[in-house]
Amino acid sequence: PILDRMPLAQGFDTYWGPLGANDGGYVKLWDQNESIGESKDLASLSRKYTDKSIDWMKQQVETNPDQPFLLYLCHTMMHTVVDASPEFRDKTGNGLYADTLQELDHECGRLLKAIDDLSIHENTLVIFTSDNGPWSNDMERQNTKNAKHVEWSKGPHFSAGSSGPLREAKASDYEGGVRVPCLVRWPGKVPAGRENDAIFATLDFLPTFANLAGFEIPDDRIIDGVDQTDLLLGQSENGNRETYFYHSGNHGVRKGDWKLLYANRWPKEFKNTYPKDRGTNQIELYNLKEDIGEKNDLSKEHPDIVKNLRALKLVREKELSKVKSR
């Protein structure tokens, strides 16, 4: 790997884990900048990651209890290829995917208990979320193209999950690709049991965390996120993000409940393994409050909304054209 792209070059003090996904039925593990080998024992990963995280937190609290810390824990599960340890195999009676999910839930519980046992729970913000929707709704294409090892290409190990009522999956700008759960715990600060579906992007974590930590963001760079402290703490139901822009196959824009998607940009000859449903060759407009599955295109009924959203998208494209790639 290129060292200046490794986690230690991006601001982290320590790193343990893989640098990529487990699509092929194995992971290559790294400790700091050193490779420590390859493992096909996917069933042990959730526990290993949790053990490492708990040990690290204990060390931080014991050696410097007044020093704030950031733990970024990216579990390999539930990314396909899935597997569960013997303790959780056949425990749910609902298949390997459910067994693996129950084990991940258990390991997250262990992490929260460790935070409680260390007596740092009242000053620790915990966020559980995902980077995108399930891998793909096109299982036939996955089984024939994606699996690098035949033994993983069929059967229960190769489950990509489900986007439920949402349309499509990863790499699509339909809701199945971009709308993910986000659970937050901060006793005494974040109201327990509260639900909110305002627009919140992972881009917003940086300015939000900076505000909570009393850190001033440098003004010599463009920060795409917005401070969502009020939304996070239950002091606002709407948040500070009114719009959201999409830049994948169906690029587009959302404002409030209205979402506009342009004609899809996936070339027919492009053998992408993710989106099966690539939309139409026409502009599409959806009201997400009434149609979360994006089944009813309202672009013809609301040309005024289409016009307004297209104007927002044009402004955004002009802003992006001024940004140099790194």
Image (spheres, helix red, strand yellow):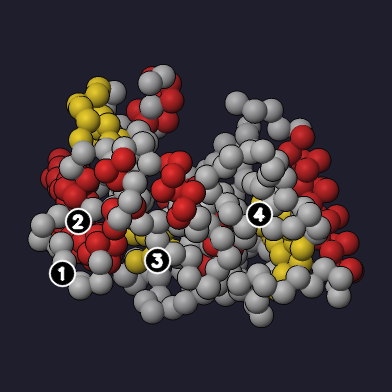
Q: Nearer the viewer, mark 3 or mark 1?
A: 1
Determine which of the numbered discs, if any, sits on residue 84 in the image.
Answer: 2
Q: Secondary structure at mark 4?
A: loop
Alpha-carbon span between mark 3 and mark 2: 23 Å
Q: Secondary structure at mark 2?
A: loop
Which residue is at a point 58% across and 54% down the rendered structure image?
A: 276
Q: Position of residue 250 (x, y in %)?
A: 69, 52
Which residue is at a point 45% across and 55% down the rendered structure image?
A: 139
Which of the two labelled residues, at mark 4 and mark 3, occupies the earlier sequence position?
A: 3
Q: Nearer the viewer, mark 4 or mark 2?
A: 4
Which of the two labelled residues, at mark 4 and mark 2, occupies the earlier sequence position?
A: 2
The foreground one among 29 and 190 is 29
Q: In this rendering, does residue 311 appear at all? A: yes
Which of the two labelled residues, at mark 3 and mark 2, occupies the earlier sequence position?
A: 2
Determine which of the numbered discs, if any, sits on residue 183 in the image.
Answer: 3
Q: Which residue is mark 1?
A: 91
Q: Position of residue 297 (x, y in %)?
A: 76, 70
Alpha-carbon span between mark 4 and mark 2: 33 Å
Q: Are marks 1 and 2 in contact (CB under 8 Å)?
A: yes
Q: Is residue 107 above or below residue 63?
A: below
* Residue type, numbered disc 1: Lys
* Residue type, numbered disc 2: Ala
Left or right: 151 in relation to 222: left
Determine which of the numbered discs, if any, sits on residue 278 in the image.
Answer: 4
